[in-house]
Amino acid sequence: MKRRLLALTILASCAALAWAATASYAAYVFRMSVNADKSVTIEWTLEGTDVSNVSVAVDCCAVHTWLNTDRSARFTTDPLSVGRHTIAIQVLERYWTNTFYDPTSCAVSTNESFRWVCLRKIWTTPMAVLVSASRDPSCIVPVLVGLQLKDAKARIARAHCSLGAVMRKASDRPSTTVLEQRPRERMRLANGATVTLVVSNRRSPA
């Protein structure tokens, strides 16, 4: 019975999120990125100075609530399980109106153009994000031929690869210029895969 009530509560929460999304013009999520530890960083925009953050929901459950007025635009979740998740941001908007009055959320306005000033909570459209089983990013072998060795090392590290053997070859190219690389560029390998280089030693070929 308890499991059934919990399932119904979750379904109701998801339905509320989906319904609220039709009015979610006060804020919108523009980027979500999965981090190495499987946490997710969300970035969003608040439309106007009368909008503030309320909470963050993952899979229809609130995972963070701001207790005071907050206008930050970035949040990182705890690590999530592998699979697809939906994330939404709830915001509080203050607005003015002449045609609607709700004593629980509205008060008499001091703005002469409107009768009431009101508050409403709105959810952004739930956004889907996929958390992969792979913990580490792949090594995408970069283009290295023609670079100086020090620049090639930096590019290898940024591509989540590692430097393997460095062999030297007689050439009239400037010293330590990369002449060959193995594997070839743009290959997708496991994180930390080694890349072997052949560099110039600045001597003319025999």
Image (tube, rainbow, N blue to C red):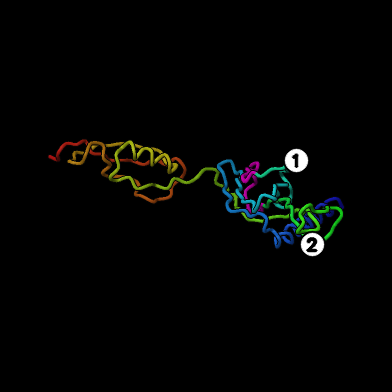
- Residue 154 location, x and y as percent? 38, 38
Q: Between 139 and 143, which is closer to the camera in this rendering?
A: 143
Mark 1 crowdedness (10 Å alpha carbons): few <14, some 14-19, many ≥20: few
Q: Is residue 81 visible?
A: yes
Kind of residue indicated by mark 2: Asn
Distance from Cα at disc 2 to Cα at disc 1? 30 Å
Mark 2 crowdedness (10 Å alpha carbons): few <14, some 14-19, many ≥20: few
Magenta part of the protein: which range? Answer: 72-87
Residue linked to disc 2: 98
Q: Is residue 10 above or below residue 74?
A: below
Q: Can residue 48 be found in the magenta stretch?
A: no
Rendered residue at 29%/46% (across/down): 145
- Residue 24 location, x and y as percent? 69, 58
Left/right of residue 99 with respect to residue 180 in the rendered view: right
Q: Which mark is residue 5?
A: none
Q: Which mark is residue 67?
A: 1
Q: Nearer the viewer, mark 2 or mark 1?
A: 2
- The residue at the far front in this view is 112
Q: Is residue 85 visible?
A: no
Q: Between 185 and 97, which is closer to the camera in this rendering?
A: 97
- Residue 201 location, x and y as percent? 21, 35
Secondary structure state at the residue bearing disc 1 = loop
